[in-house]
Image (cartoon, rainbow, N blue to C red):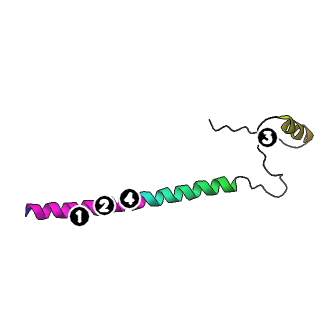
Amino acid sequence: MGSEHAAILGHVAGRRLRRITRVAGMVTLVAGVSARAAVELTHITPPPQPPLAVVRDSLGAVREAFNAAVHRPRLVMMLSPT
């Protein structure tokens, strides 16, 4: 009776482990797809707005664009990966 009980417990534990592994895999897949979509969709802007730009070296172009829109609301956002 003891070995049957251990076999049943082992079978149940194995099923739980497979279920947990499947769920973790699905969560990882959904997170990966969501992250990829976020990266792909972040450059899209509404029609009247000019496309987003990445400034790497000089802020001269940013200063010109900022100063050109004197009578409109302006926002400068600086992001860093660190």
How far apart are the two marked residues, 4 and 2, measured between alpha carbons?
A: 8 Å
On screen, residue 46 versus residue 69, left or right, reads left
Disc 1 is placed on an element classified as helix
Question: Dot 1: within a 10 Å radius of its alpha carbon, few (fewer than 14), some, or many (20 or more) residues?
Answer: few
Disc 3 is placed on an element classified as loop
Residue underneath mark 4:
21
Q: Residue 16, which numbered label?
A: 2
The answer to which of marks 1 and 2 sits earlier in the sequence is 1
How far apart are the two marked residues, 2 and 3, measured between alpha carbons?
A: 51 Å
The answer to which of marks 1 and 4 sits earlier in the sequence is 1
Residue 37 image point, x, y percent:
63, 57
The answer to which of marks 3 and 1 sits earlier in the sequence is 1
How far apart are the two marked residues, 1 and 2, measured between alpha carbons?
A: 9 Å
Residue depicted at 83% across the width and 51% down the height:
50
The amino acid on which the numbered mark 2 sits, given as a three-letter code, is Arg
Disc 4 is placed on an element classified as helix
The amino acid on which the numbered mark 1 sits, given as a three-letter code, is His
The amino acid on which the numbered mark 3 sits, given as a three-letter code, is Leu
Badge nearest the viewer, 2 or 3: 2
The amino acid on which the numbered mark 4 sits, given as a three-letter code, is Thr
On screen, residue 24 versus residue 57, left or right, reads left
The reply to whether callout 2 and callout 3 are in contact (CB within 8 Å) is no
Q: Residue 23, which numbered label?
A: none
Residue underneath mark 1:
11
Residue depicted at 64% across the width and 38% down the height:
81
Magenta span covers which residues?
2-23
Badge nearest the viewer, 3 or 1: 1
Residue 4 image point, x, y percent:
12, 65
Q: Residue furthest front?
A: 57
